[in-house]
């Protein structure tokens, strides 16, 4: 029998599902129980192919727009949030809906509206085309908010065009990149009104800090997460920038190149806020079957956060 190659596997914590993702998935599953399939969900409930396939197998139909939902059917809005116009459209159509927007995204929506009502022009740091950004920008008139993606966008802003300015951000950004952009904005606008508490959420911050804590020790890091997931992509960037160039985003365990892994002695494994622990366990089972594994856990924070589900599903 071949002797197994020895490997060290670093498992940082926190990793995997956050409270907002758990709540959103719960909302869909409880809706299936209460109302029966099919249940329509506008956009992927969270950005993870495993979660989406699992819910589809239980009777969920994911749609792009409300026009794709049959009359009288019930629809759920994804964890990323929706523009006010989407809720208005559902109300106009008398379409029953349940809002699975993460409460931490809703907090940013409230900030946007408050700043707008106070007469401030808003800068939103975020990624164009991401559903959360579309939802946040859609809380207020389009000309009262400017999306800032990078330093070039900041260079183009003319300070003399604005009297009062405020800042909000997407919840799933790179903590370090965002801090740099905020610094640049503040150099241009010393009176920039900042969020009372950071908009980047606790889950994003903790997962990035956790992967950073192992990056220098690892020859390779595997980040389990969806290819369209902002959280997942940021984790890969943070791991690479923090000392582990061989960082791979893995959306399906079957896509892992196990032969390539033989070249790496210390390996890191984490999962983004929308990736289920079942995929971590699948990875671990295969890893242990192929290598002699020494597992090292690296816990950098405890998370005890949970969010209430809507009343209609608690009854
Ligand atoms: S990543 Fe943060 S903002 Fe997004 S669903 Fe999770 S807790 Fe909410």
Image: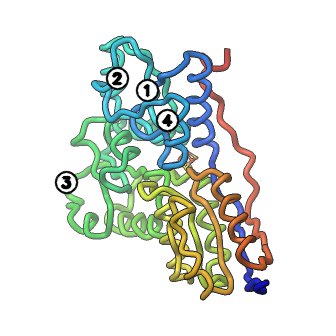
Using the image, tell me which numbered label, if any, was put on residue 161.
3
In the depicted structure, whether residue 68 falls above or below residue 172: above
Q: Of residues 221 and 258, which is closer to you in this image?
A: 258
Report which residue position mark 4 lands on.
56
- Mark closer to the chain start, 4 or 1: 1
Residue 251 is left or right of residue 141, and the answer is right
Q: Position of residue 122 (x, y in %)?
A: 33, 47
Q: Give the label, 3 or 4, closer to the camera.
A: 4
Image point 33% across, 13% down: which residue?
A: 71
Report which residue position mark 2 lands on.
69
Image point 55% across, 79% down: which residue?
A: 242
| Cα distance in 3D space between marks 1 and 3 | 43 Å
Q: Quadrant of residue 294?
A: bottom right
In this view, the residue farthest toward the front is: 1
Residue 179 is left or right of residue 123, and the answer is right
Using the image, tell me which numbered label, if any, was put on residue 40.
1
For label 4, the SS is helix
In the depicted structure, whether residue 173 falls above or below residue 30: below
Residue 266 is left or right of residue 235, and the answer is right
| Cα distance in 3D space between marks 2 and 3 | 42 Å
């Amino acid at each position: 029998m071949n002797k197994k190659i020895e490997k060290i596997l670093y498992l940082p914590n926190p990793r995997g599902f956050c409270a907002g993702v758990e709540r959103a998935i719960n909302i869909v599953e409880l809706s299936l129980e209460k109302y029966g399939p099919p249940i329509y969900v506008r956009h992927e409930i969270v950005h993870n192919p495993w979660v989406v396939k699992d819910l589809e197998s239980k009777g969920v139909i994911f749609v792009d727009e409300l026009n794709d939902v049959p009359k009288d059917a019930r629809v759920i809005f994804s964890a990323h949030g929706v523009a006010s116009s989407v809720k208005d459209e559902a109300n106009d159509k008398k379409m029953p809906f349940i809002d699975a927007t993460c409460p931490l995204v809703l907090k940013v929506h409230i900030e946007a509206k408050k700043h707008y009502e106070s007469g401030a022009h808003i800068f939103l740091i975020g990624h164009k085309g991401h559903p959360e950004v579309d939802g946040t920008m859609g809380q207020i008139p389009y000309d009262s908010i400017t999306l800032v993606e990078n330093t070039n966008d900041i260079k183009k802003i003319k300070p003399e065009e604005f009297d009062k300015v405020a800042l909000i951000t997407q919840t799933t950004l790179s903590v370090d990149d965002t801090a740099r952009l905020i610094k640049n904005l503040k150099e241009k606008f010393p009176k920039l009104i900042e969020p009372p508490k950071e908009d980047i959420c606790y889950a994003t911050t903790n997962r990035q800090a956790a992967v950073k804590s192992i990056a220098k020790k690892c020859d390779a890091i595997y980040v389990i997460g969806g290819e369209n997931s902002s959280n997942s992509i940021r984790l890969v960037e943070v791991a690479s920038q923090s000392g582990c160039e061989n960082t791979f985003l893995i959306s399906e365990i079957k896509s892992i190149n196990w032969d390539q892994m033989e070249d790496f002695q210390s390996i890191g494994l984490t999962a983004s806020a929308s990736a289920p622990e079942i995929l971590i366990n699948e990875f671990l089972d295969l890893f242990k079957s192929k290598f002699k594994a020494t597992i090292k856990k690296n816990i950098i924070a405890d998370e005890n956060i949970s969010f209430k589900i809507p009343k209609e599903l608690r009854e």
